[in-house]
Amino acid sequence: MVVHESPIDRAYQYLLVAAFFFLPITVLGNNIAIWLIVILWFFSGNYKEKFQQIKNHSLALASILFFLIHIFALIWTENLDWGFEIVRKMLPFLFVLPAFLTISRKENIRYYITAFLIAIAISVGLSYLIWLGIIEPFKYATGIENPTPLMSHISYNPILAIAIYIVFHELCFNKKITNFVFALYSFFALSMTINMFITGGRAGQVAYFLVLCILVMQF
């Protein structure tokens, strides 16, 4: 992994890889990795440099602005308790996204994506094992009609659509892809596509067709 010499930056990179890996597998693991990053980011100093990084990053500024809009909206809400609950849910836009945007490294993107795709492959494999009746349903899975064990199909399918986009993008636009990797990714894309339609998440299925439209336009 290409990282700076700083131990803190090295810790950031490993935690980022862990966060991407845990994303389709466990909410708890993902949350632990994310908040460890945020806590480390908050207490690691260099606040002037971090402020400049956020100031120069339009997406980080947009994320903070999105959170502040929810704070401002409390002025006219008729239910402050619910308003504060929504603000609590929006906290990642104030802390998490700006932190992620300032610590991520372009040269390490392939590690983040690889960790994410490995986790998706594990999730898809377990889903097929339950769907084929090879293993018993566990955790969120209830049977053949709902064979997604590691998260609910409502969350699983949109994340699966993102993975499908990444794999199709590599197949369509990576000119340096080897024959072996092309065959492997093609099999993976087909497996994920079939899995998309046996798990029953409609939001993910809509996202799947949107992904195809985006790829066609990009192509």
Image (tube, grey):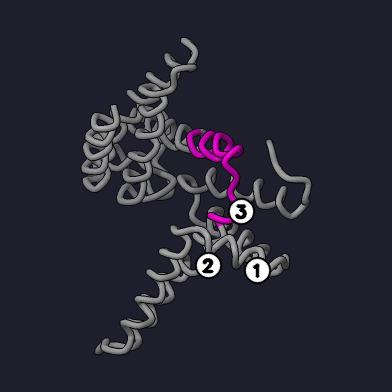
Real-space Cα separation, disc 1 to disc 3, in angstroms: 12 Å
Q: Is residue 36 above or below residue 104?
A: below
Callout 2 amino acid: Phe
**Where is mark 3, residue-wise?**
103
Q: Is residue 110 magenta?
A: yes
Q: Amino acid at mark 1?
A: Phe
Q: Please give the name of the residue rendered at 46% of the width and 32% of the height, measured from the top-left corner.
A: 121
Residue with the mark numbered 1: 42
- Name the dominant secondary structure of the magenta segment: helix
The residue lying toward the viewer, choosing from 88 and 71, is 71
- Contact, mark 2 vs mark 1 (Cβ under 8 Å): yes
Q: Quadrant of the C terminus?
A: top left
The residue closer to the viewer here, 178 or 24, is: 178
From the image, state whether disc 3 or disc 2 is nearer to you.
Answer: 3
Secondary structure under the numbered disc 3 in the rendered image: helix
Range of magenta residues: 100-117
Find residue 85 and report its horizontal and vertical position in percent: 38, 78
Q: How many marks?
A: 3
For label 2, the residue is: 95
User: Three-letter amino acid code at disc 3?
Assistant: Ile
- Which secondary structure lies at badge 1? helix
